[in-house]
Amino acid sequence: MSYGQGGPQSQWDPWKPNSQQPWSSGGDDGTPDWAALAEASETRNKRRRLLFIGGGALATIGVGTAVAMAVVSANGGNDASGKPTNLPATASLPSGSATAPSFAPTSAPPPLDPKDFISSAKKDTAPLSPETLFPGTQLTMGDTVYKKGATSDAKNCSTGADGTLPKILTANGCTRLIRASYVKDGIAVTVGVAVFDTAAQAEKAKGQTDGRSMVLSLAGKGVKPFCNAAICRSTRNAYGRYAYFTISGFTNGKNVTKKDTDVFRTGDDLQQFTANQIYRRGQAQASTAANR
């Protein structure tokens, strides 16, 4: 291939290696065409400036887009957690010094104490009789059934008491003595309830009793006489304005010893039943008063 006139000529670019420099059309003296070289250089410089300006505009657009996206992300309606983020400005939020509504404290009234109603004659106004204290014809304590016998209701408390008890009851203002007898398998018991106006009187009377302070046994209605001459077992106690006593023994006149556990159990059962009946009396009156 010839590199003379008429052969292929490559476009000279000073930025490309191994490119040929353009020469003048005369080409006979070997001198470069300086005017052509200057024009080509100026053209290249203009193109480079346009590229830099274009790149700067694109960068500006990119930055602006990033800022816009950041603003949208910060002020969007909801974030990824689903919680609202478009809250009002702090200045528009309610102040922490706002007065909260106040309410008067309320509480349920305390339950009424049954003992309050059986501690004073002024509050203990429910009907009282042998039948209210000892209802029915028998009573059951656990697996044991006791048949009820005779009952008694005396305003003169000394007539139903024995030993040192009559004097104690009278001295402390006893107003009534109610008695009832029960029997099972040849063992009989009489329980006597002495009524006072106040719990203090009943407690004082009980405190003055001793081993010789006994209620008189009561026979009749299926209960044979007992404890008239034989040794029997007796108990003494008080609850509210009531003092209550038991005497228990054999209907055949046999003396009671410490080995006679059935006699002790009979007395304890009737003592417990009487205490329960007095408590129920107070409980019923407390319930009535609470529902008024």
Image (cartoon, helix red, strand yellow):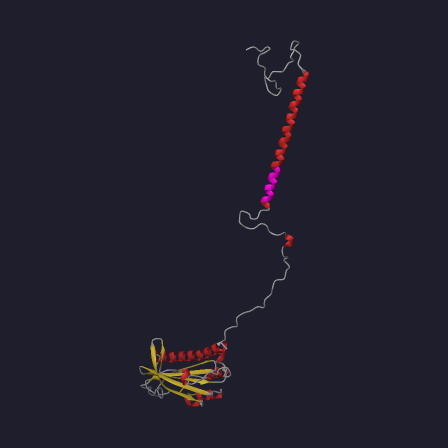
Which residue is situated farthest in the top direction here?
28
Percent position (x, y) of residue 122?
Answer: 51, 83
Q: Is residue 232 visible?
A: no
Q: Which image quarter holds the N terminus?
A: top right
Q: Is residue 193 visible?
A: yes
Q: Main secondary structure of the magenta part?
A: helix
Q: Residue at x 62, y 38 (%)?
A: 64
Q: Residue at x 64, y 30 (%)?
A: 53
Percent position (x, y) of residue 23?
Answer: 64, 14
Figure check: 52 above or below 36: below
Please identify the quarter of the rendering in which residue 150 is found: bottom left
Say whether residue 67 is magenta.
Answer: yes
Q: Nearer the viewer, residue 253 or 184?
A: 184
Q: Nearer the viewer, residue 46 or 70?
A: 46
Percent position (x, y) of residue 75?
Answer: 60, 46
Q: Residue at x 66, y 25 (%)?
A: 46
Figure check: 48 above or below 6: below
Say whether residue 20 is magenta.
Answer: no
Span of residues in magenta: 63-72
Percent position (x, y) of residue 234?
Answer: 39, 83
